[in-house]
Amino acid sequence: MKSGPGKFVTDFWLLIFRVAVSVAMLTHGIPKLQMLFSGGEITFADPLGIGDFLTLILVVFAEVVCSGLLILGAFTRLTTVPLIINMAVAFFVVHGADPFGKKELALLYLFIYLTILVFGGGDYSLDRFFKRR
C-alpha cells in the first residue's frame, strides 16, 4: 500500500516551492544588483577577505542568477550550491556573532536550498526536459 502524496502533487509542490523561494530571494538580490551597476563606490561586507567588489559579484550571482535558474528549474541541484554557500556564509560568518533572530532568515534559506538540492526540481522543470533528450 502506497502512502503519501502522489507524484503529481510532489512535482507540483516542488515547482511552487522553488519558484516562491527564488522570487523571495530576488527581493534580496535585486538591490545588490542595482548597487553593482550604480556606478558608485562599492562598499559591501567582505567576510572572506576576497574584496568587497568580488564578494558583491558572487552574492549577486547567487541571489539573482541562481534564483533565476531555479525559477526555470535549470541545473537545479548545481544552482543550489552557490546559494547554500551564500547562506552558510551569511549565517555562520556575516551574522555569526548576532543574536539568533538576526541570522534566522539565512538559516531558513540554507535549509530550503539543502532541501531543493536533495529533492531536485521535479518534473515541472527544465531539468526534466533536458533529461528526456
Image (cartoon, rainbow, N blue to C red):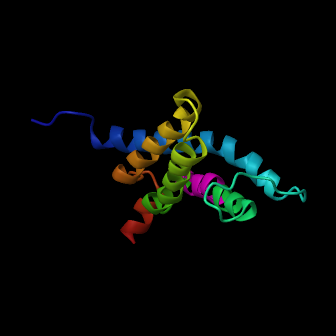
**Residue 5, x across and y down, in percent:** 27, 35
Depicted 116 relative to depicted 95: above or below: below
Q: Is residue 69 magenta?
A: yes
- Which part of the image, by quadrant, shows the C terminus? bottom left
Residue projecting furthest to the front: 97
Give the extent of the magenta segment: 61-71
The total of numbered circles placed on residues is: 0
For the point 59% across and 40% down, which residue is it? Answer: 95
Judging depth in this view, the residue of 44 and 64 nearest the camera is 44
For the point 67% across and 60% down, which residue is it? Answer: 55
Residue 7 shown left or right of residue 32 in the figure: left
**Residue 102, x across and y down, in percent:** 59, 31
**Residue 37, x across and y down, in percent:** 83, 59
Q: Main secondary structure of the magenta part?
A: helix
Depicted 65 relative to depicted 92: above or below: below
For the point 81% across and 52% down, which residue is it? Answer: 35
Residue 42 visible to the viewer: yes
